[in-house]
Amino acid sequence: MLAELRTRTVLVVAAHPDDETIGAGGLLAEMQDAVVAHVTDGSPRNPADALAAGCGSAAGYAALRRAEMLAALALAGIGSERTRALGLCDQEVTAQATEAARRIGALLREVRPAVVLTHAYEGGHPDHDAVALAVHAACALVEAPPRMAEFAGYHGLRGWMEPGDFLPSGPEAVALRLAAEARRRKQAMLECYASQRETLRIFSPAVERFRYAPRYCFTAPPHPGVLNYERYPWGMTGARFRELARAALAELGLEDGL
């Protein structure tokens, strides 16, 4: 699997600027032909995060997060010409999953990757789950779809946020243990995201995990119990996510599943 990600054309689809580094920062520097796309601009409609980062507006915060992302990716040898911005609002992808799927579909037709690497559906963050839905839907709607793979982010199966691993019920993952130089580079990439310093403290630069994507039912819970994002005031519950997912799939003509 890692050989395929290193040598084939890969489209990395991340929800927010920094997700690509959390999930695959070490591997990105080894990829021969990767394009990195961000579905959101990293700036929620609620101004609290922008103000905390010293930005006077949502637009200013989005610009800051893009600058941080470009600096991080530059350390992995990826220039701005190999990035794409889909421009949706942070924390609102679930409500715009249909549009996200259509924009990702257009990217698939542009880039023509052999593999698309993205989030797992695990209840960690609603945008992560919605991007997973949008990628799977886009792949179902294009001719000759790429193989789908996932990087580990975080989930809350046991009652707290668990970073850097997948839910234990999924398919087997491959662990990439980064050598010293790669760990230093990934740590430097994480440090480029100064506005996210507190959030990123829990993520280790030592190991990254990848797997081929399973077939998901996005109208069923990713795991029993409380989802990680239900513990935060983000305005999203698992029941609401599944309702919106069902509506998006119907709008895309995928009522019968993916």
Image (cartoon, grey):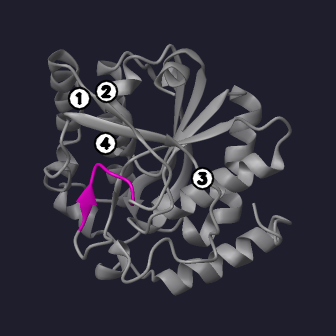
- Which quadrant of the rendered structure holds the C terminus? bottom right
Residue type indicated by callout 3: Pro
Which of the numbered marks, if any, corresponds to residue 256? none
Residue assigned mark 2: 26
Q: Is residue 223 left or right of residue 47?
A: right
Q: Please report whichever mark, 2 or 3, sits nearer to the chain's N-terminal start.
A: 2
Q: Position of residue 232 (x, y in %)?
A: 29, 78
Q: Is residue 14 left or right of residue 139?
A: left
Kindly check if marks 1 and 2 are in contact, taking CB atoms under 8 A apart as contact.
Answer: yes
Q: Position of residue 211 (x, y in %)?
A: 49, 41
Residue assigned mark 1: 186
Residue type indicated by callout 1: Lys
In magenta, the rendered stretch is 161-167
Q: Please report whichever mark, 4 or 3, sits nearer to the chain's N-terminal start.
A: 4
Q: Rate crowding at label 2 as few (under 14), some (14 to 19) or many (20 or more) other CA atoms within 10 Å.
A: many
Residue type indicated by callout 4: Ile
Q: CA distance from mark 4 to mark 1?
A: 9 Å
Comparing labels 2 and 3, the label whose residue is closer to the camera: 3
Which of the numbered marks, if any, corresponds to residue 214? 3
Q: CA distance from mark 3 to mark 1?
A: 27 Å
Q: Is residue 101 left or right of residue 163?
A: right
Residue assigned mark 4: 22
